[in-house]
Amino acid sequence: MIGLTYMLGWGDLVNSGWLTGNILKDFVKSVSYYVAWVLPYWWSIILIGTVLLTFMSLGIKFGIDKLRRGNAPD
């Protein structure tokens, strides 16, 4: 989720025309933009996405375990 929101923030920088073409300056600017704007305003997206991914992975794990056990008694 962090990578996804960082890339979306990078897209905001590209669309707004804030990038200079200098790789180092653009990287520092993108990280400061991410910490100052993306994290405070998109924390709910990061949190909800992380929780959903966790529940999906747990559901897949339990589903695979159930398939492996088959119809064996508990």
Image: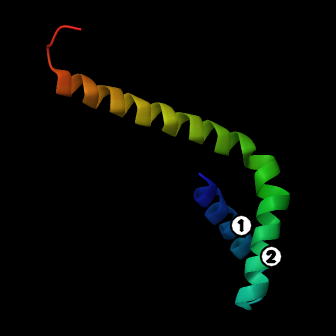
> Where 54 falls versus 33 (above or below)?
above
Q: Label 1 belongs to which residue?
A: 12
Point out the image quarter for the C terminus. Answer: top left
Q: Nearer the viewer, residue 11 or 2?
A: 2
Secondary element type, mark 2: helix
Count neighbours of disc 1 (C-alpha within 10 A) and say few if under 14, some if 14 to 19, many if 20 or more: some
> Where 27 falls versus 35 (above or below)?
below
Three-letter code, disc 1? Asp
Secondary element type, mark 1: helix
Drawn side of residue 42 relative to residue 55, left or right: right
Q: In which quarter of the view is residue 25 placed?
A: bottom right
Task: Give the residue displayed 64% in from the left and 57% down from the top.
Answer: 5
Q: In which quarter of the view is residue 62 placed?
A: top left
Q: In which quarter of the view is residue 45 placed?
A: top right
Is residue 40 among what the camera can see?
yes
Task: Give the residue displayed 39% in from the left and 28% down from the top.
Answer: 59
Q: Tell how many labels.
A: 2
Q: Label 2 belongs to which residue?
A: 29
Drawn side of residue 21 relative to residue 32, left or right: left
Q: Nearer the viewer, residue 10 or 27?
A: 27
Three-letter code, disc 2? Lys
User: Which residue is the extreme one toward the front?
Assistant: 74
- Percent across and percent down for residue 18 are 80, 78
> Where 44 falls versus 9 (above or below)?
above
Please report whichever mark, 2 or 1, sits nearer to the chain's N-terminal start: 1
Count neighbours of disc 2 (C-alpha within 10 A) and say few if under 14, some if 14 to 19, many if 20 or more: some
- Percent across and percent down for residue 41 are 79, 48
Separation (CA) of disc 2 from disc 1: 12 Å
